[in-house]
Image (spheres, grey):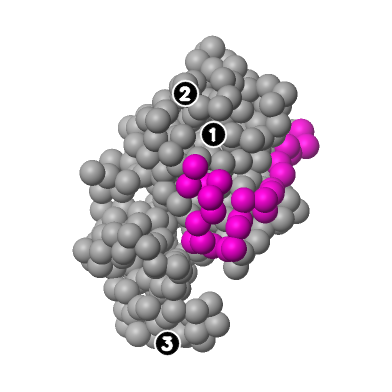
Amino acid sequence: MTAPLLHTRCPELVRTLPFHRLGDGPTPVRRLTGTARDDLWCKDESRYGSGGWGGNKVRKLEWLLPELRRRGTRTVLTVGATGTNWGLAATLYARELGIDTVLALIDQPEDEHVREQLHRLRASGAAIHRTRTKPRTIAALPWLFLRHAHGLRPPAYLPPGGSAPIGVLGYVEAGLELAAQVAAGDLPEPRHIVTPVGSGGTAAGLALGCALAGLRSRVLGVVVNDTLPLATKDLTRLADRTATLLRRRGASFDLPPLRLVSTRTHLGDGYGHPTPEASAAAEAAASAGLRLEPVYSAKAFAAALTAAVDGPALFLNTYGPRG
Ligand SMILES: Cc1ncc(COP(=O)(O)O)c(C=O)c1O
């Protein structure tokens, strides 16, 4: 198994932060042709992951799952919307390590994309509870912990999107990987890196990874979730908590200021509500060979097409369907 760059960069972490590789890096970078701008690049996370699902959740699980295994966890409980990519990836990859998954699902606007995902979730082996709204989900949690306990041991809780600091390490790793690709001349140093923001771990981790590696790129997080409308300061706090985790586990490093900003310009009417700009962006992406979905990646791509044109921009393709 190839060692993660984070272990190479901070050898102190080898003994304190277990890692379990689930995908092959580096993920490809390429210049996108046929879009409205000619300096738009893509780092394609869609194929990352060896199992039945890919995309940005897999890198988070590479750090979350071995930590859970170390603690002897048999069942995890997590929360997502009915089209959750996170819930699906968590279920499929946790099962590979012998861990069961319980999902509490909150309703989102239902379209073909969501119905297909719900179908995949039902087939995944997760124990599914349709708790429908955020307040009902919070109220149901104590019962769900009891219902799925093994003896006296309740399931371990994973936050939505896997955006606990340990999960965020997945995108610190991606930031280090990107810096190595820039150093190798595979792409120019991006001025902006554009990524969707649901639970925030991807944007926060990337900004921290880029800072650790000395890249000057600014991460532009495109907020798509109005129930967790993460502002720049929230993303920065998550990145800071992740840096603290690394230091607590023995790493030492100097950190330049993070270059990270969030925008709500592409949220439209809220989570899962389509926007005309995102629909047009998904079509433009398709002609550049990218398959996007309407909830996250199409809204971020719309932002990438219009982000400031003072240098190359990099779009992070976070959506990982299989088949
Ligand atoms: C396809 C896709 N892109 C982006 C995101 C957002 O990533 P994060 O939760 O790390 O902000 C998610 C999940 O929430 C997702 O499923």
Would residue 191 be found to the left or right of residue 108 on screen? right
Q: Which residue is mark 3?
A: 143
Residue 261 horizontal/vertical position (percent): 72, 44
Is the residue 120 above or below the residue 240 in the image?
Answer: below
First of labels 2, 3 by sequence position:
2
Which picture quadrant has residue 148?
A: bottom left
Dot 1 falls on a residue whose secondary structure is strand
Rounded to the nearest angstrom, the CA distance separating label 2 from label 1 is 15 Å
Does the Cβ of the disc 3 residue fall within 8 Å of ligand 1? no
Residue type at mark 3: give it.
Trp
Which mark is on residue 315? 1
Residue located at (52% from left, 47% from top): 278
Residue type at mark 2: give it.
Gly
Dot 2 falls on a residue whose secondary structure is loop
Which mark is on residue 26? none
**Image: magenta residue range:** 256-280
Residue 8 horizontal/vertical position (percent): 52, 28
Dot 3 falls on a residue whose secondary structure is helix
Near-viewer residue (141 or 310): 310
The answer to if 257 sits in the magenta stretch is yes
In the image as oriented, which residue stretches furthest toward the top? 185
Near-viewer residue (48 or 41): 41
Which mark is on residue 34? 2
Comparing labels 1 and 3, the label whose residue is closer to the camera: 1
